[in-house]
Structures are given as structure tokens and as C-alpha cells.
Image: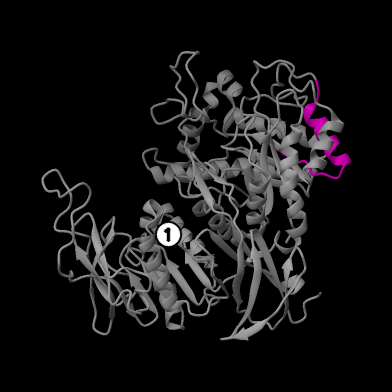
């Protein structure tokens, strides 16, 4: 597999026409000095921005009105002089100038109104404008012709390392005149939402195919990336339509301080590793998000983020925004340089490698369930891979179904065969139900009775606190579930592991008790909270969604205990506090496995999450089970060798100190020193 450059910058340059002298302070040496200070080996540079202006001599498009030089060309030349790759950025889905000149090129809804994000067409000119406020553009008709013409220009004028097309979103769907004509020619029913979305996917793929053809005709080795095609859990349904297929790499844009936290990237990385293409983790140098001039993360926080990207096998990219005058901010590159100096020391033990595990997570496509289960796995240091209907499941000792309905008859049959061949399933919530919610598709040892009768309920684990495997670390009292579980009737031979206590009634205006929720009835309900039949453990609540929404520790402990009943021989294991993170990468070409341990609790400050306090952990235990014979283990980057011990089929080491990040390389038989 081609390995993407490891230390990248995405240099935003969305610049208003109201700002004078754009690019006037660009200096090649100063630009190069910044890249050297930041230890950067790839930077995305702007050909065209969201304002609709181009930063190179274009006959097809519109040059920024106060730009007097070929800024893109001079930047590319400066990069190539010092061996830095310089893919070209081009906006697609947002372009203010084009929207103003050609409103017919915008995305329109069914009623004919222009579709926009955080934008009010009727607002007075002096009204404050919200963050991220743009009209959506449709890649068809005259706008498509413009974009293809500019792509031809760029490929003819420059030595192109790659094209990075932005805002390539399958939704919102479009009902402009061009799209209406296209759908009419194909016989698409405009009232059929699924058919309209499928047409949108074909339209976007046509744009991707045409730009790919143009770029690779002149620059066959150029990278291509269409941003928006690797997002998850919205109406775009990127995975279903394979919208990422034209990408030569998968850039995963996450701004953890304000876009949902530090645990989104590990799940996305494991999903898109399955495409077999290089991964790039994208964050920002900003305190908040894109478009923030003067916002900073400190170098230690950037280093943690970069290490976490490398720990997932991804290259590292930090977003910056160039001042309109074209002068680089050297403080930014000093801070980025701190992070990339560390990446240089560890990149050969991470970038380009793939996570490996014998624990599989089967995605439901519902964000709260999937991300909630992912958080519980990360917080209990359980390494996992993402598996699905097309994958070989034989490498998984255990597969988790995260809670939402997600199975077809054929997929259920595949999982049933997996269990019959010795595999184990942890089934949460409604995962085993058919799409209509009428019956179980999997044998969980129970018959489906119906949905919950109250808004909340309570779990009681047998012998909690008295040594039972499922009750370890749990209270013996009934504990609250903020959403009640489905009802099922256990079959003969099924072991009930935990009971449900129903609430007396749902909280309504007609019936309520106290401030929040109704208390539990004194007796167990007929339907259980947890049961086991052979290699299948069933937890009736959607614990992933509950944990995603409210993060109650009792739910994570219950989940972890249930998983431990099945997952008795993980490939890698450790014990760290819940902010600790563990990943295991395989590098067969180097004859080694690399375990990455991270520890730096994210703290909530106002609307943001920050990485600041990095307390050390000492003498952290680490166990690894792999098919090969492990010959030696050493710390990365120091090279210090660790003493090996062997017990219970695993190799054990003690990691002297984990502060922010520590990698441990395990060389296997035949591995080179």
C-alpha cells in the first residue's frame, strides 16, 4: 500500500473580496522557513476558496479582485524546492461568487428555494453572520462545466501532486432545473426520497469520475480526495453508496475540540482502513474550528493528537489558515513543529499500519449506538476492528452488535453460521430484531414479546458485588436505564443473568413522581435485562445509545463485564484509567506488532474540549497474544528493551511510564532488529 506523507498541513485561504492587497506579503523564503520550522512534508494549497475566488491566473473562473500575483504557482514552486508535496485545494459545494452570479447553479429544494447552511437571504447586510454560513452548489450543468474547465487549467499549468475537492456532500439533494431534467430523463420519481438520493449519488460520482479522468490524464500519480465522502451518520449514507471510491486516500476530518470529542477518529479510522487506502487524520491548530484567525492549541496538545493519529495507522494533518496578505504565522509552525518532531520519531511504527484485533464491531449505522459502544471499548482499553456483511468473520473471537436494528435476513444467517462455527456474539438492544421490529433474526435464547411499556426501567444484576462475573463492580440495587428495554421471554435452557424492574408508570402530565423519573416496582419483571445462551450474550438495553447520551459508569461496567464473559483471550490488554487509550498495529513487512498507549484526559472548558493535563502513569501492565513467537519488546522511540514474561498464552511486559503517548514494539520470529 502507498504510504501517504506523514506530516501535513491543510492551509485554508477563504478570503473576502473586501480585504485589500491579498497575497502582497507572500515571500518564498518566509513560506519555506515556516514549513521547515513545522517539519512539514505535505501542504494543501488553495486554487479556489468558498468565497468563489481563484488564486491563480484562470480564464475559466474569477481571480480574487485584489490579488496581483500567481499565489498558488509561487507556493507550489516554494514547496517543491524543499521537497514538500503540494496538493491543490478546490472548493465544490460552497462558492459565494458563483452563487451570486449564477443562482441557478445552487442546490434548490422541492419548492425552488436555494438551500443554505446557517444563511438567511432576507437578513439585512449589517446583521451578524453565523459561523460556517454558505449556500450549497450543485455539481451539474454550467457549474460542472466551470469546475472541469478549472481542473483542466490547473493540470496544464502546474506540476500537480494531487487535487483536494471540498464539500462533496451527497446531501442536501437538489431539485434545480438541471437536476429535474436529469431525473426526468432517467424516470426518477421526484417524490421518492430514496430514488432522489440515489440520483444525487450518481450525479456526484459523475463529477468525481470526470475530474479523476482529467487529473490522471496529465498526472497519473496525483492523489485525489473528495471531502465529505468519508463523513458518517447523516443523510449522505456515504458507505451505502460507496461515495469514497474515487479517493486515492481517505482523509478523516475531525476537529475534536468542538466536533464531538477525541473518540470519533478511532472509530472512523477502523472503518476506513477497510477500504485498503492510506488514511490521514485531520485536525486543526485552532482552539475551536475552521476559520478561526488567532486561535491556538499548544504544542503538547497537538503532539497528543498527532500521536493518536499515528496510533491508528494514519498520517497527521493539521489545519491552518493563511493570513490574507500571504504571510505565514511562525508561531503556528513552531507549535506544529513540536508535534511533528515527535511524529518523526514514531512514524515508522504507526503510519501506514493497520489495527489488528480478534474483537469485531458490527456497525448499525446509528451514530449514538455505534459511537457509544466505541466509547465504552476505548475507555476500557479494548482494541477492536470494524466488520460487516462483506468481511471474513473467522478472525474474530467475538463480534458486538451495538444496539440499533441493522440486520437483513442474509446478514443474520451469516452471523448464525459464525456462531455455529465457534464464534461468539454480544448482542445489544434491538440489534437482533428484523427491520420491522416484529421478531428476532438471531437466536438470542428468547422470543421477542414487544417494546417497552414505560419510559425508563431499572437493571438488577444477580449477586452484584458478591463475585458474580456480570456483577463485578456494580451496585446490588436496581440501577436506572434512561430508556427502557424491549421485552422478551427466555426459552428453556437460557440463563438469565440480570433482571428488569419496570417503573410504576411513565412520567407524563397525568402521572408523575418527583423531579425526574418514576421509581421502580419492587418485583422483577417477566422480561430479563441480560441472558446467555451458549456463545451468545444478550443485553436487552441499547447500552451504546445510553452511554453516548449520558455516560453512566454503571452502563459501561455492565457492558464490559458482559464482554468479558465472551472475550476471554484478547490479542492485547492493559489496565489504565478510563482516559487511557490502547491500539495494536500490525506491520508484517517489518515482522512486528506495535502497541500504542495514550493517556491525556480531555477537559471541558466552555464549549470546547482541551488536552492540557498529562499526568504520568507508571508500571503499566501490557499483555499481547499473537500467532507468532515474540522475540523481544522495546519502547518507541527510546529503544529501551523490556523484559518478557509468559503466562496464560500471552506475553507480558511492564511499561515503565506512559505520559501522553508510549509505543511498544514487539518483534516476532523472523523480524529484523
The residue lying toward the viewer, choosing from 78 and 658, is 658
The residue lying toward the viewer, choosing from 463 and 409, is 463
Q: Is residue 487 left or right of residue 169?
A: left
Q: Is residue 160 left or right of residue 566?
A: right
* Badge 1 density bin: few <14, some 14–19, many ≥20, Cα 10 Å: some
Identity of the residue furthest to the left in this view: 510
Region in magenta: 69-88
**Residue 155: where, in percent of width, then height?**
78, 37
Compared with 477, 265 (above or below) is above
**Residue 57: where, in percent of width, then height?**
78, 24
Q: Is residue 479 left or right of residue 204?
A: left
Task: Look at mark 1 in the image and give the residue it sits on.
Answer: 364
Image point (34%, 72%), residue name: 538
**Residue 81 covered by magenta stretch:** yes
Compared with 398, 329 (above or below) is above
Numbered label tally:
1
Image point (72%, 43%), residue name: 336
Question: What SS does tag 1 mark?
Answer: loop
Q: Is residue 248 visible?
A: no
Amino acid at each position: 500500500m502507498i504510504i501517504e506523507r506523514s506530516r501535513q498541513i491543510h492551509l485554508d485561504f477563504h478570503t473576502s473580496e473586501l480585504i485589500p492587497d491579498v497575497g502582497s506579503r507572500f515571500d518564498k523564503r518566509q513560506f519555506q522557513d515556516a514549513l521547515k520550522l513545522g517539519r512539514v512534508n505535505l501542504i494543501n494549497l488553495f486554487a479556489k476558496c468558498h468565497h468563489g475566488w481563484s488564486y491563480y491566473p484562470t480564464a475559466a473562473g474569477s481571480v480574487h479582485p485584489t490579488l496581483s500575483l500567481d499565489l498558488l504557482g509561487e507556493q507550489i514552486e516554494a514547496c517543491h524546492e524543499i521537497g514538500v508535496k503540494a496538493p491543490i485545494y478546490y472548493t465544490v459545494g460552497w462558492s459565494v461568487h458563483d452563487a451570486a452570479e449564477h443562482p441557478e447553479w445552487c442546490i434548490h429544494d422541492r419548492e425552488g428555494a436555494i438551500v443554505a447552511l446557517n444563511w438567511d437571504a432576507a437578513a439585512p447586510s449589517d446583521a451578524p453572520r453565523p459561523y460556517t454560513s454558505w449556500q450549497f452548489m450543485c455539481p451539474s450543468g454550467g457549474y460542472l462545466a466551470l469546475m472541469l474547465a478549472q481542473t483542466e487549467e490547473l493540470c496544464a499549468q502546474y506540476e500537480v501532486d494531487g487535487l483536494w475537492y471540498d464539500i462533496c456532500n451527497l446531501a442536501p439533494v437538489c431539485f434545480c432545473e438541471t437536476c429535474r431534467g436529469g431525473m426526468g430523463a432517467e424516470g426518477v420519481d421526484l417524490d421518492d426520497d430514496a430514488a432522489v438520493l440515489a440520483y444525487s449519488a450518481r450525479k456526484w460520482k459523475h463529477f468525481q469520475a470526470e475530474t479523476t479522468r482529467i487529473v490522471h490524464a496529465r498526472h497519473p500519480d496525483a492523489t485525489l480526495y473528495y471531502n465529505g465522502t468519508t463523513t458518517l451518520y447523516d443523510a449522505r449514507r456515504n458507505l451505502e453508496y460507496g461515495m469514497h471510491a474515487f479517493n486515492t486516500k481517505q482523509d478523516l476530518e475531525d476537529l475534536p475540540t468542538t466536533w464531538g470529542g477525541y473518540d470519533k477518529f478511532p472509530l472512523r479510522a477502523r472503518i476506513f482502513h477497510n477500504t485498503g487506502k492510506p488514511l490521514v487524520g485531520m485536525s486543526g491548530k485552532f482552539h475551536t474550528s475552521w476559520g478561526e484567525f488567532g486561535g491556538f492549541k499548544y504544542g503538547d496538545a497537538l503532539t497528543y493528537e498527532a500521536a493518536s493519529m499515528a496510533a491508528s495507522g494514519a498520517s497527521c494533518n493539521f489545519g491552518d489558515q493563511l493570513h490574507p496578505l500571504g504571510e505565514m504565522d511562525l508561531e503556528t509552525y513552531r507549535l506544529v513543529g513540536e508535534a511533528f518532531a515527535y511524529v518523526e520519531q514514531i512514524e515508522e511504527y504507526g503510519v501506514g499500519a493497520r489495527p489488528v484485533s480478534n474483537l469485531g464491531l458490527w456497525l448499525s449505522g446509528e451514530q449514538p449506538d455505534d459511537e457509544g459502544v466505541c466509547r465504552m471499548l476505548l475507555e476500557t482499553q479494548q482494541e477492536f476492528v470494524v466488520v460487516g456483511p462483506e468481511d471474513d468473520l473467522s478472525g474474530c473471537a467475538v463480534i458486538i452488535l451495538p444496539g440499533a436494528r441493522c440486520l437483513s435476513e442474509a446478514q443474520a444467517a451469516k452471523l448464525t453460521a459464525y456462531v455455529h462455527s465457534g464464534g461468539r456474539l454480544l448482542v445489544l438492544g434491538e440489534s437482533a430484531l428484523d427491520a420491522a421490529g416484529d421478531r428476532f433474526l438471531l437466536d438470542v435464547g428468547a422470543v421477542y414479546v414487544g417494546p417497552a411499556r414505560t419510559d425508563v426501567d431499572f437493571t438488577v444484576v444477580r449477586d452484584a458485588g458478591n463475585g458474580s462475573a456480570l456483577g463485578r463492580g456494580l451496585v446490588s440495587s436496581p440501577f436506572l436505564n434512561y430508556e427502557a428495554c424491549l421485552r422478551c421471554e427466555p426459552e428453556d435452557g437460557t440463563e438469565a443473568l440480570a433482571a428488569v424492574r419496570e417503573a410504576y408508570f411513565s412520567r407524563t402530565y397525568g402521572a408523575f413522581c418527583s423531579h425526574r423519573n418514576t421509581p421502580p416496582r419492587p418485583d422483577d419483571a417477566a422480561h430479563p435485562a441480560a441472558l446467555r445462551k451458549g456463545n451468545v450474550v444478550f443485553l436487552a438495553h441499547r447500552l451504546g445509545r445510553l452511554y453516548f447520551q449520558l455516560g453512566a459508569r454503571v452502563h459501561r461496567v455492565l457492558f464490559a463485564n458482559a464482554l468479558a464473559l465472551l472475550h476471554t483471550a484478547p490479542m492485547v490488554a492493559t489496565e489504565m484509567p478510563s482516559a487511557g487509550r490502547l491500539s495494536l498495529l500490525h506491520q508484517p513487512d517489518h515482522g512486528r506488532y506495535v502497541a500504542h498507549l495514550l493517556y491525556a484526559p480531555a477537559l471541558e472548558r466552555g464549549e470546547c474540549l482541551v488536552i492540557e493535563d498529562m499526568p504520568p502513569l507508571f508500571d503499566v501492565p501490557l499483555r499481547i497474544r499473537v500467532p507468532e513467537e515474540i522475540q523481544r519488546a522495546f519502547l518507541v522511540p527510546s529503544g529501551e528493551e523490556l523484559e518478557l514474561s509468559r503466562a496464560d498464552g500471552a506475553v507480558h511486559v511492564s511499561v515503565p511510564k506512559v505520559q501522553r503517548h508510549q509505543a511498544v514494539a514487539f518483534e516476532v520470529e523472523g523480524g529484523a532488529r
